[in-house]
Amino acid sequence: MNSPILTNKRVTYIMSGIVLFSGMLLIFLLFSENKELKQSIVDEQNKYIELEGILQHTKDQLAKSKEDINSLNNVLTTEQKRITSYESKLDDYTDTISELEKLTTIEPVLLQKYSKIYFLNEHYTPPELKSVRDEFLFNVDKKAEVDKRVYDFLNEMLEVSNNEDIPLRVVSAYRSFDTQSQLKSNYTVTYGAGTANQFSADQGYSEHQLGTTVDLTIPRLGGLSTNFETTDTYKWLMDNAHKYGFVLSYPKGNSYYQFEPWHWRFVGTELAKDLHNDGKNFYDLSQREIDEYLVKLFD
């Protein structure tokens, strides 16, 4: 029969063994878990380092992209400046071509100084003539024609003046070489050569042959008269005719003909305004100065 004391010792040994085993197992398990935790931390650190590298690479790429964008912007700005420069040059070339085209279609004779200076031959006639409206004629039975290119300027001046109770009327306008020749002959017979030369041009020297010149009056004067100078209509013309491109050809003191307050020639709005603003007359300028306005004659 076994002794109970021995049995208890065995039990104690067994329990001690179990406790020891449990402790060792716990230590093993703790060691194992700690190792896995450390590995997990290491793995996370590696991932962080990898992500940090990716982030830095992305930042570098972004910085390079910004540099590329700035470089492209600089290139774009340079190209835009070049294009603007080319466009400006193209505009200049276009304007030059346009001016050259105008100069090929606008006859230089239209701004030449006649009246005993330049001669207009018998073959010259305006390209196309247009009749002044009957309501603006001094004598409706005597038609008056002007160069078609001048018509709108003259018509506007007549309309505006009449709307302002300034009754401008056209006595005469275009006269051919032959008509001027006959007219001068008649004046010479009537007044004598000396007197006729003071107010009437020889054929080829008359501004009327250009189709850009008109003689103006008002109904109550009954025709052309130096008394036209005393009328409100003449004052209106002196103040406003330049706006429509017309100037007084033979003012007081000119060296060509007697004072003719009725004789108005179209020279274009730009030249007419400059003459008005500078207080000069058409025949005061040199032909070279006048020719500079030719390209803008009908603008």
Image (spheres, rainbow, N blue to C red):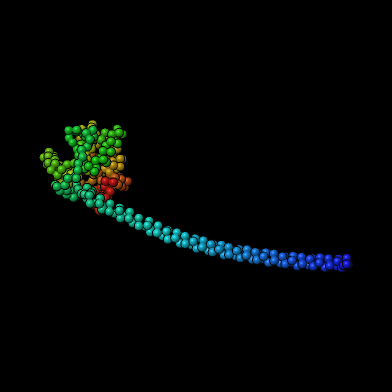
- The residue at the far front in this view is 1
Q: In the depicted view, which residue is nearer to us: 5 or 41?
A: 5
Instruction: Return the x and y of residue 170 as percentages of the image width and height.
Output: 22, 36
Residue at the image point whose x is 77% and y is 67% from the top: 21
The percent coordinates of residue 133 (x first, y second) are: 22, 35
Vertically, is 280 above or below 170? below
Classify residue 46 by image quadrant: bottom right
Question: On the rendered structure, is 51 left or right of 117?
Answer: right
Residue 110, horizontal then vertical, whole percent: 22, 47
Foreground pick, 184 / 158: 158
Percent of width and height locating residue 188: 12, 41
- In the depicted structure, whether residue 124 falls above or below residue 236: below
Asked if 93 appears above or below 211 in the picture, the reply is below
Q: Quadrant of the N terminus?
A: bottom right
Q: Is residue 58 visible?
A: yes
Q: Which residue is drawn at the image coordinates 44% and 60% (left, top)?
A: 72
| Residue in the picture at 63% in, 63% down | 44
Task: Answer with left or right where residue 95 lies relative to residue 225.
Answer: right
- Residue plotted at (28% across, 42% down): 244
* Relative horizontal placement of residue 218, taking residue 46 as reference (left or right): left
Residue nearest the observer in this picture, 264 or 50: 50
Quarter of the image for residue 250 reads: top left
Considering depth in this image, is 64 or 244 the residue closer to the camera? 64
